[in-house]
Structure formats: structure tokens, C-alpha cells
Amino acid sequence: MKDTVDSYVTEDGRTIGKVLMDMKNITLRFGGVEAIKDISFDIREGEIRAIIGPNGAGKSSMLNVISGFYNPQVGEVWFRGEKRPPMKPFQVARHGIARTFQNIALFEGMSVLDNVMTGRLRQMNTGLFAQALWWGKAQREETENREAVEKIIDFLEIQAIRKTPVGRLPYGLKKRVELARALAAEPDLLLLDEPMAGMNVEEKEDMSRYILDVNDEFGTTVALIEHDMGVVMDISDRVVVMDYGRKIGDGTPDEVRGNQDVIDAYLGVQHD
Amino acid sequence: MSADFLYGIEVVINGLMAGVLYALVALGFVLIFKASGIFNYAQGVMALFAALTLTGIMSGQVPFSHLINAIFGTEIHHFGWHVPALLAIILTLLVMIVFAWAVQKFVFRHLVGQEPIILFMATIGLAYFLEGVGDLMWGSDIKTLDVGLPQGGSMWVENATSGLGGDDFYGFFIDKLDMVATVVAAILVIGLVGFAQYTKQGRAMRAVADDHQAALSVGISLNFIWVLVWSLAGLVALVAGVMWGAKSGVQFSLSLIALKALPVLMLGGFTSIPGAIVGGLIIGVGEKLFEYTIGAPYLGGATENWFAYVLALIFLVFRPQGLFGEKIIERV
């Protein structure tokens, strides 16, 4: 069983480490509706972990629990071996969890470079007054972070649009800029909410490649949501399958593919 | 050049300088509106309150002295000291920052996600509350504010320009205080724009103005940014209060100058810092020039009271988003 070992090496030679995030018995309710019902799963260091399921399965709710936009009524969230108290989204972000959004949440009026620079706020520690007076430390910090951001911009091949206001970019590029901003935070855990939604086949392939490259190059742990099964199965190490707020499958893509509950959920077999 | 034409130029110059003060008040509105969608009716009262506090601190007045005397039967009014202008300005700024924090903590924090009209009503309440607090703290008498700014016409400008016209032209009359106000406002605006453009907090400020959810996801605390924005609006109010107070005394009608910022905002757009500046200048020049060319000779004068609003109305009809505002596009 892979669950019990400290670390293992994948077929393509990447090392998957110990458990980074552990979700224990999460239940999330909105009034009388249970969006998530008693779900437990973990995310290991260095892996690409997918959460899939049909529309309305509770995938986005789960991602919002991880990123602090929702706080579950029942259950515990463990991150880096510590139990996490209820947090606001900005505190979660400062704890090293970066995310993207299904419907893209970028700063439309700001340039690509400025958008990606906002991702570096976690790394910039000079106080308000030093910033206001533009003291040496503030200036040095800006330069250092600018360098880090330029590397990410190169990596995702968006140099040509660095100074363009994001509002003017086409959809596919916006998705990439959002990924760049999340990466700029150098997160311990990168959450991607339907990174391929609304893309054509070619764009989906590009995005898959970037996700794999990010994971490979920076060793970033990635958790992503998708309802398109095909792409996800190709790039994920392990997959959680949700349906109607419950977990119906968890394992490697091959294990999940053979799971009868999963097949039923995707084919729309009637529930009791 | 004819004297009439030269006096016209003088009117324009004076209009520009009055416009700078309008722009300053409008700028306070724009800062808060952009970051939080709140139309802050209390901006004018904040300028009044800042000016009252500054004069109070400088003259060593005891805050809430009426209240204290009424309760304890004492007769204290003054500490008996005078605080130098610069120190008093810094202290006043601290008061404005505390005010910003309190407004966020006790009012707007609890109104997140409410309709704009409710936020607007809250600021009306805030305006009258703050006016009352100002009265209670410092008294309602008219005070003179003397922070050492130069007063009166500039002889230097008058002498240097008197040669431009004939014998019936004596040179441009320009108020020294207006010149100082213009320079200070320009420095303030450049500083604010630089802060917003090139610093971490400025970038966070712009991010919050753009998209709250995205701002949260990169680790920006909305509360902190809103306190920051209200503090900056407090700083702008302080500068506006000092300039207006030095010009016409610190009195409660000062809060009405905020209403002059409304046409400025309609002209420039509610979300644009350059818009506030250009709008202020256009209103300042427009109303002075209209008074000089049409108002005084044909309409019996005093057109400055309403001209700005008529201009704003015309703008509302033809370009409702203002000169620089974001275009309102309705998709069907």
C-alpha cells in the first residue's frame, strides 16, 4: 500500500514525498444542503492530485475548503503536519497555498507583469512606511522579486505580453497568466480550479504540458479539479472521484478507471 | 495685448488654482470609491474635522472641554501650550488614521457585500456623526488656521508680468496661498500615484480595486487595504482642510466644499485619479471664466454657485461615465 510508505518513486522518476495536506472527515453544509459528506483524502508532496466528478459533485466546494473560502462544519484540515485552525482566504494564501479560479479572477485593469507581481506579496516583507518612502530595502526587494517573476514569465512563455493589460488578452492566455500569478507565490500547494475549462484541444494540451513542467521543474505539489476525465487521467498521479458530495473512488488513474461506482457516476446510473 | 485678454488669462490661472483644491477633495472620493465601491459623502466633513483638529492641537485646546466642564464642574479650556505646525500636522494625521481604522472596524466591516445605496447611507450618517464629534471636541466657533503659509498677492508675479500689457494693465494678481496649494497638491498627487504604481501596498490597493476575490487569493487582507485607503483619504482631507482653512477660516461650512467635488467627479469619472485632477481643473477654470465673460456682464453675477452643476448635468447626458471613467457597457 502506498498510503503507509514515507515516499516512493513514480514510473517516470519523480519522487513523491510524505503527506502534505490531510483532509479528515470533511463535511460542508449550506443551510440544509450537504455539499460535502464526510470526505477524507490526502495530498502528498510533489504529486499531481486530481479531484474529478460530474457537475455538482462538490469538487469546487472541496477546493474552496482547502483555500479557506469555506470553512467546513465538521472535520479537520491538516497542512504540513499541523492541524489548521479556521482561516480566512488571505491567511491561507500567506500559508503557501496558491490557487486559480474556474472563471478566472485576474486584475483586469493591471498589466500582466503587475498581476504576476501581486503573487509575490508573500515574499515581500518591508513595512508600509519603508514602502511609502521607497527606502533602500523596499527598492532592493522590488528588484529581487521582479527577477523571480521574470523567470516565471519566461517559463510560461508570456514575455511578449508582459506590459499588456490583462483585460485585453484572449481566454487561453488569461488562464496562463493566472497560473503565472499563482506560481509566483512559490506555493507549497498549487490549487487549480478547472484549468482546462473552455479550452480547445490544442490549448488543453498546452496547459497539460505546463502543469507537468511546473511539477517537474519546481517540484510543486498540484491539486486540480476537472470534470473532463481524459486529460486528468493522463497527468495525475492519484485521483479522488466525487459524486453528490461523497467520495466514490480514490487511487491511481488505472484503479479509478476500473471502479464500478465511478463508471456508474459518469454514465449517470440512477441513485437509490 | 489688450488688457481684457490679459485679465482673461489671469482668470484662467486663478481658476486653475481653485480647481486644484476641488481636485484635492475629489481625489479623496476617488480613492475610497475605487477600492471599496463606497461613495463617501463624509469626505468634506473629514476635511473639516482634520482642519478643526489641527487648529485645536496647535492652539493647545482641550478636546471635549465643554463636556468635561459640564460633568465635573471644572473650568478648563486650554492646556496653555502651543504646538508647532509640523508636529500638529503629524498628530492630526495620526488622528485621521485612528478615524480610518475605527470607521472600518465599527461600520464598514459589518456592511461588506451590502448594496451601494446602504453603504452610501452609512457615509451620510458618518458625515453628520463626525460633524457632531468635531463640534463636541473643538467647539463650533470659527477659527483661524495659521500654519505659516504665505498670504496675500504675490508682488513678484505682479511686477514680472506688468510689462505685458499697456498702461491699464498692472500685472497678474495671484494669491500666494493658491500657489502654495497648487504645489502641495501636485506633490501629493505625484506621491499618491507613485505609491499606487510602484510599491507593494500600492499594487495591493490596485488589486483590491480590481477584484476582491482575486486579491484574497494572493494573500491580500481586504480590511488592511480599506483602512489604508481611508487613511490616505484622511491625508488628502487634511491637506484640503489646511488649504481651505487657511484661505477662509475653519468653519462648519467647510464641509459643503465636498458638494463642489460632485460635479468634478461627474466630469472626471468616479474611478479615475487623473479624471479627478482634470475634472477639478475644468470646473475651476470653467466657472471663473464663465463668470468673467458671461455671468458678471449679462446674468448679474454669482454664477459660480451653479455653473459647475449645469456643466456636470450636460456631461451626464452625453458622457455618463465621465471623461476618464470606465465605459458602462450593458450586454444583453
Image (cartoon, coloured by chain):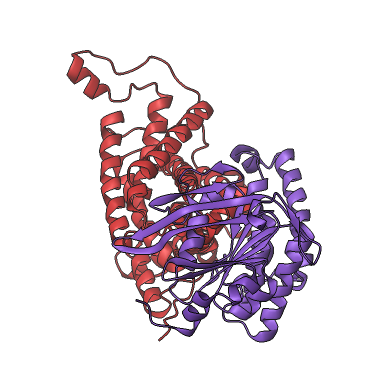
Chain colours: A purple, B red
In which quadrant is the C terminus of chain B drawn? bottom left
- Give whichever of B246, B126 is nearer the camera: B126
- Outermost residue on the right side: it is A13
Please indicate, yes or no, whether residue B14 appears anywhere in the rendered image.
Answer: no
Return the x and y of residue B180 as percentages of the image width and height: 55, 44
Please indicate, yes or no, whether residue A62 appears anywhere in the rendered image.
Answer: yes
> Residue at image x 69%, y 63%?
A113
In which quadrant is the N terminus of chain B drawn? bottom right
Return the x and y of residue B87 as percentages of the image width and height: 52, 26
Return the x and y of residue B137 as percentages of the image width and height: 30, 29
- Quarter residue B254 falls in: top left
The reply, left or right, for residue A231 in relation to residue B213 is right
Return the x and y of residue B191 as percentages of the image width and height: 61, 48
> Residue at image x 52%, y 50%?
A90
**Residue B326 drawn above or below residue A268:** above
- Quarter residue B244 falls in: top left
The reply, left or right, for residue A91 in relation to residue A233 is left
- Quarter residue A36 falls in: bottom left
**Residue B92 drawn above or below residue A134:** above
Q: How many marks?
A: 0
- Give whichever of A249, B110 is nearer the camera: A249
> Residue at image x 37%, y 61%?
B262
